[in-house]
Structures are given as structure tokens and as C-alpha cells.
Image (cartoon, rainbow, N blue to C red):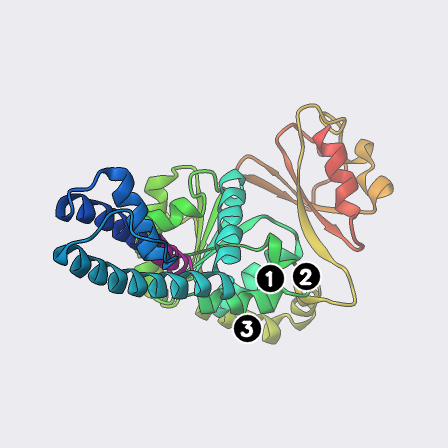
Amino acid sequence: MEEDLKRRIKHVILAFSIIVGVFIFGIFGYMIIEKWDIVDALFMTAMTLSTVGYGLPKPLDYDGYLFTTILILIGISSYLYAIGVITSFFLDGDLRKYMKWKRMMKMINKMEGHCIVMGGSEIGKYVIRQLANRKYPFVFVTPTSSRVDEVKRIISDIMNEENFMYVVGDAMDEQTLLKAGISKASTLVVTLSDDSLNVYVSLMARNMNKGLKIISEADNVTAIKRLRYAGVDNVLSATEIVGSRIASLVLNPALQSFMDIIHQSNNIHLKMEEILVNVKSPLTGKTLKEAQIREKTGLLVVAIQSGTDFKFNPASDTVINPGDILVVIESSENQSKKLREIAEG
């Protein structure tokens, strides 16, 4: 879409350039052929091209009449071409599309800490819907505009089209990632159809943003090691995930049903959240018992991450330190919002 708009704009600029070029051609033609000054040449050119039909500023000789005839033919052809291009540009809504695209690019340039989702596979579409549902800022990157329309339909019930940020471009081109704000993004999700492309994009993205968290899909289990070498932080294989889920349904059906409720429930609002504890938070230095998180917010703390260490099912005397991440389960909308405000201090 971006390239198509630029091409249409170039055609409009070319149309204006041709008209200006014909005008200059007429002025210099009369100055050279008829030896007129610039004022007379300008008046004659304007009169000829506009087909107004005033009297001649000075008599023309044979070469002058011949040049005027040629200028009229060229002028009419140029006008017809320019009118067609410009009319098409406005009637097709290209100007509106271009202004909308420019506004979107400005919004993307202002984004920080967002997620870039590259690729329009079914997994990528699911990721986008989840991000949109949680109102997490993201930019969708795809090589084809048709994928953009597909994603718009998928998230139309939970996100306004004006808030949907996307970039259409070649995944192998650094400019595509730059337009998506790779330098200020916090996460890149790569869901391209080819594992080799996932590896290449991951290498390129890691070089462009050293602190970026990269999550990649792997179609083939054998590609996991290559993606790890490419600097991918988390590699997910659809084969392994589906196999694990099926095994869980066989071995632990009740547990799997519970996890399905957490991730997929529509009637029961049950989801997991991460809450970062700020150094200024009143929670700092308190035990879980003293913090009374469940009593104040109704949230269940299932784990605490301190650096790289995880404490699952922490005891009531576990001390909350600044920088800790509380992993909680909420059973109703916006329960975690209250705790997040407390944790930020």
C-alpha cells in the first residue's frame, strides 16, 4: 500500500512537471524562433496553452506558426494526461490514504516499548488479537496489504481501525523494521512462514536493537537451535505445543481444563498478570501477609520473580523486594489495575 501510494504521488508530480516543462518549452521556443523578449514569449505561451484566443502580441512568421501548432498539440496531450492522473488521484481517495499513512507513521515514530509482530500466519493473527484485546501497543509488519485487511477484520470488534498500526514491507529489508520502530520496541514476535526467514529477521533485529526481546515461531523442531543461535530469547514450536497439550489432556485432564479456562474463557474472566514492584511502592519490604494483597484486591499471588529466580506458591512470610515481579491471577476485570497502582508507588 505504501509503495502504491508513493507511485501514484510520483505520477501526480510527473503530471505537474510535464505541464511546467511544456510551458518552459513554449517560452524558450518563441524567444529563440521569433526573437521575442521573455514577456511576449510568456504571454504567447500562456495564451496558446490556455486556448484563450486573444490577438497575437506580434506577427508570427512561418516557423512561428509551425512551432505554435506543435505547442498546441503537446499542450493538449499534456493537459489530458495531467487531468486524468490528478482526477484519478483525488477520486480514488489516494490523497486521503496518503495523509492517513503519514499520520500513522508519525504515531509509530512516537511509540516506545511496543511489540512488533512480523508475519501474518495464523499464529501471528492470534497473537495480534490477544495484544489488541489487552490494549498492548503493537505494530503489525507484513509483506502484503491483503494480510492487513485480514487482520483488520479479525480485530474489528475489539479495536478501532485508527489505532491499528501496521507497516507493509519486505521482511528482509532493514527499512521495514526501522519504519516499525525497532529501535524503541521492547519485543519482536516473528511468525514468518519459513524458518530460514525467521532466523534472518532475528539476526537483523538483534543487530539493530541489542536489548530487544525476540520471540519466534518455529515450523520445524530442528530450527529451534538455529533460532537460538540467532539471538532469539524464546522459540515456540507449534508441534511441541500441540503435542504437549494432547499429552496433558491424557495425563492431567483437570489441570488442562483449568489452563484452558485461564487462556480461553469467555464467560469466566480468569487470567494471569505480571505486576512490577517499584522501589517507592508501599509493598516494598513487607511480607505477603503484611501486604494483604488478596484482602485489598482479591488477587491470588501464585509466584514471585526476583531477578532470574522464581518462587512458586510463595509463603505468607515471603518478603516483597523492589524490582520483584508478582505473578497473580485475577477473576474479574481490572482487579490487577488496583494492585498495579499500589506497586508503582
Q: Are marks 1 and 2 in contact (CB under 8 Å)?
A: yes
The reply to whether residue 169 is visible in this rendering is: no
Residue located 15% across and 54% down the image: 61
Q: Is residue 133 magenta?
A: no
Residue 158: mark: 2
Q: Which residue is mark 1?
A: 129
Of labels 3 and 1, earlier in sequence is: 1
Identified by mark 3, the residue type is Ala
Q: Residue at x 47, y 67 (%)?
A: 147
User: Which residues lie in the magenta part?
Assistant: 1-15
Residue at x 55% of width, y 73% of height: 247
Indicate which disc, 2 or 3, sits on the residue closer to the N terminus.
2
Location of residue 19 in the rendering, given as x and y in whole percent from the top left corner:
31, 54
Label disc, if present, on residue 58 of the rendered structure = none
Residue 130 shown left or right of residue 174 in the figure: right
> Which-is-in-front pick, marks 1 and 2?
2
Nearest the viewer among 38 and 232 is: 38
Determine the image quadrant of residue 316. Answer: top right
Q: Quadrant of the image for the N terminus?
A: bottom left
Q: Circle 3 — which element? A: helix
Residue type at numbered disc 2? Ile
The residue closer to the viewer here, 12 or 32, is: 32
The secondary element bearing badge 1 is classed as helix
Q: Earlier in the sequence, mark 1 or mark 2?
A: 1
Estimate the spatial distance between the alpha carbons at disc 1 and disc 2, rounded to whole Å.
8 Å
